[in-house]
Image: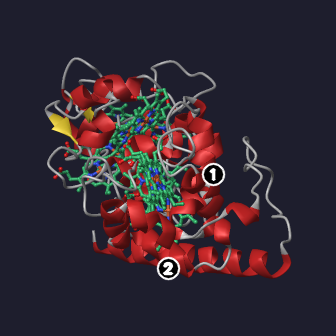
């Protein structure tokens, strides 16, 4: 948990740096970003139509007060008008103010596509490893936008402007996953020990299932189960090639140790048969499955790899 805090602070600092840097560079040169264009282009802005957030304050007193307490207050420091305060998200307000306020003259986050919403937010948030892959995420592809999980004005959580805390937030849509974490053996996500976002990047990434990887680009499981990382003198091949999920389910299971099969021998025999074939080595013929040779890991105890035994005895 401690590590998590450290890495969070680090990534936060980096993303702040990038934000400030991005703003500074673009305000100096107006140079286009080197990144590939987002799927929805940022709408063109007429800079003469910005009126400044103080004008909004006049009529939206409560909204303004609330805004002052959120992290977005920092945008008031930004020099570019289209990145400053209320109008950074709602667009230029001149037409709205000239009409004396009222509905229908401002950009609101309703009646527009999820992509259009996220593109507004990504204007400032697309830099940094955490968010830069949002457009390729299953969430984006399936019309889940930033404001399904975050709310700039009506957040229910004190951190990260979230509409709900984890795992309630995630499970509100992923009902099928809720059952996984209620099984006898499970990662203690409901109990708050670890979080969905320890393993998944809800903002998208390069791996399937929006999985995170460790800093060393290893599978995410090794972030916490460091003792399984090796390297070992004698590696058990599938741990490295097919990964932890070749034997374990990640969320929860009726089987001890989150194993995919109810009995250890059934698991091993999926790859290690009695007959010699091209796959894993066949098991010795003295391994009679009627009796003591069923409990494979009673003898092959170091099943994740060993420095002393090529058959993983210790
Ligand atoms: C002259 C007063 C006035 C000013 C100045 C003003 N507003 Fe409004 N605004 C209103 C009123 C009145 C409404 C309608 C409120 C309602 O009916 O709920 C409104 C509605 C809105 C809405 C919702 C629009 C909709 O279609 O539902 C947004 C967003 C908004 N204002 C943002 C802003 C921003 C940003 C600024 C500053 C650029 C601003 N307002 C300045 C009076 C004002
Ligand atoms: C970071 C982006 C962002 C900023 C900055 C922002 N808004 Fe909003 N605003 C939104 C979103 C998103 C919604 C839709 C409701 C929601 O998800 O909270 C919204 C909704 C509104 C509404 C509709 C009524 C409501 O309560 O939802 C009004 C009015 C409004 N904003 C005014 C303002 C004013 C005034 C400011 C500046 C003091 C401001 N907004 C700053 C993103 C922003
Ligand atoms: C499926 C839900 C979900 C969606 C969609 C989502 N977020 Fe998040 N976001 C979260 C959660 C949960 C956190 C809490 C922190 C964590 O553990 O990563 C978070 C954290 C953040 C943070 C603060 C921490 C950090 O990583 O810098 C920012 C900024 C953020 N999100 C912006 C966005 C933007 C911008 C979008 C849209 C492009 C978006 N989020 C879409 C759930 C979501
Ligand atoms: C004008 C640039 C800008 C836009 C547009 C913008 N943000 Fe932000 N956002 C910021 C800045 C700056 C911070 C504060 C970063 C910090 O202090 O680390 C921030 C912080 C956040 C955080 C983190 C809150 C926390 O507690 O750390 C979330 C979540 C977030 N924004 C979501 C959104 C969403 C959702 C949208 C679109 C509705 C959006 N932002 C639009 C600039 C922007
Ligand atoms: C507003 C609804 C909604 C919320 C909230 C939500 N998701 Fe999703 N999520 C979806 C949809 C829709 C998909 C794409 C369809 C699918 O795979 O179920 C998806 C896809 C995913 C995937 C990829 C699955 C795959 O098969 O590739 C992961 C992982 C995921 N979400 C994790 C999370 C996490 C973690 C949270 C909480 C931080 C969360 N989701 C919150 C709706 C949501
Ligand atoms: C211990 C790490 C871990 C945690 C914690 C975790 N997941 Fe997963 N999740 C995975 C892995 C690994 C897969 C891919 C499984 C596979 O490919 O066989 C996955 C798959 C998924 C999928 C794709 C569909 C499926 O069931 O295979 C969704 C959706 C998902 N997770 C959502 C969530 C949500 C929501 C939470 C929190 C309630 C969560 N996960 C917590 C590791 C985790
Ligand atoms: C954020 C840290 C974290 C991550 C990431 C993580 N685990 Fe765990 N895991 C734990 C903790 C803590 C326990 C201890 C079980 C408990 O007390 O709830 C555990 C327990 C286990 C167990 C033993 C379960 C039992 O029944 O005793 C297995 C097997 C396991 N994890 C496999 C995995 C796999 C596979 C992955 C990757 C998909 C993974 N873990 C990712 C923290 C993590
Ligand atoms: C070849 C199958 C296989 C693979 C691949 C595998 N495991 Fe295991 N794992 C097992 C078996 C079998 C057990 C039960 C051990 C026993 O019976 O004593 C186990 C037990 C565990 C345990 C609980 C007991 C302990 O040793 O701490 C954890 C945690 C664990 N595995 C994590 C992982 C992680 C993380 C990975 C990926 C790096 C992984 N496993 C890959 C077969 C496997
Ligand atoms: C996903 C397939 C897979 C599963 C499941 C699996 N193994 Fe393996 N195992 C392999 C492969 C592949 C090798 C080694 C290939 C090589 O190095 O030539 C191996 C090697 C071994 C070796 C070393 C044999 C030698 O001659 O080097 C032993 C012992 C072993 N496994 C035992 C087990 C046990 C016990 C289990 C069940 C807990 C198990 N394996 C589950 C694929 C698997
Ligand atoms: C009572 C202890 C014991 C149990 C239980 C046991 N083994 Fe073994 N296993 C051995 C011994 C002894 C060897 C031979 C070691 C050697 O050659 O140095 C061996 C060797 C192996 C080898 C290596 C064969 C080769 O040609 O390199 C595999 C694979 C293997 N066992 C798989 C399994 C599987 C799968 C199970 C469970 C179905 C299992 N073992 C249960 C003691 C056991």
Looking at the image, which residue is at 53% across and 44% down?
A: 237
Residue 94: x and y in percent read 63, 58
- Pointer 2 residue: 13
Quadrant location of the C terminus in the rendered image: bottom left
Looking at the image, which residue is at 30% across and 29% down?
A: 177
- Pointer 1 residue: 95
Quadrant location of the N terminus in the rendered image: bottom left
**Which element carries disc 2, helix, strand or loop?**
helix
Q: Is residue 306 visible?
A: no
The residue lying toward the viewer, choosing from 140 and 153, is 153
Using the image, determine if residue 26 lies above or below residue 216. Answer: below
**Whether the residue under disc 2 has CB within 8 Å of ligand 4:** no
User: Dot 1 surroundings within 10 Å: few (below 14), some, or many (20 or more)?
Assistant: some
Q: Based on the displayed image, in which of its 4 quarters is residue 78 positioned? A: bottom right
The residue lying toward the viewer, choosing from 207 and 23, is 23
Q: Is residue 50 visible?
A: yes
């Amino acid at each position: 948990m401690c590590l998590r805090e450290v890495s969070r602070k680090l990534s936060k600092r980096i993303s702040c740096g990038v934000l400030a840097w991005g703003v500074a560079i673009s305000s100096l040169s107006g140079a286009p970003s080197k990144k590939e264009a987002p799927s929805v282009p940022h709408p063109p802005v007429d800079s003469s139509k910005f009126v400044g957030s103080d004008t909004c304050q006049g009529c939206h007193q409560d909204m303004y007060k609330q805004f002052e307490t959120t992290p977005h207050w920092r945008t008031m420091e930004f020099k570019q008008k289209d990145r400053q305060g209320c109008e950074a998200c709602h667009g230029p307000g001149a037409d709205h103010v000239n009409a004396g306020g009222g509905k229908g003259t401002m950009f609101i986050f309703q009646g527009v596509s999820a992509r259009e919403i996220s593109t507004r937010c990504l204007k400032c948030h697309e830099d940094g490893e955490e968010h830069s892959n949002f457009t390729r995420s299953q969430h984006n592809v399936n019309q889940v936008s930033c404001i399904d999980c975050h709310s700039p004005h009506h957040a229910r959580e004190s951190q990260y402007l979230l509409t709900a805390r984890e795992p309630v937030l995630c499970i509100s849509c992923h009902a099928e996953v809720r059952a996984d974490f209620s099984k006898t053996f499970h990662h203690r996500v409901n109990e708050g020990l670890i979080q969905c976002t320890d393993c998944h990047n809800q903002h998208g990434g390069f791996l399937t299932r929006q999985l995170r990887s460790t800093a060393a680009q290893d599978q995410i499981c090794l972030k916490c189960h460091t003792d399984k990382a090796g390297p070992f003198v004698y590696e058990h091949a599938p741990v490295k090639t097919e990964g932890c999920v070749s034997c374990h389910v990640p969320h929860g299971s009726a089987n001890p140790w989150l194993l995919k099969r109810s009995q250890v021998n059934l698991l091993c025999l999926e790859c290690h048969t009695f007959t010699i074939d091209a796959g894993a080595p066949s098991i010795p013929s003295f391994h009679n499955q009627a009796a003591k040779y069923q409990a494979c890991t009673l003898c092959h105890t170091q099943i994740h790899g060993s420095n002393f035994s090529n058959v993983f005895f210790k």
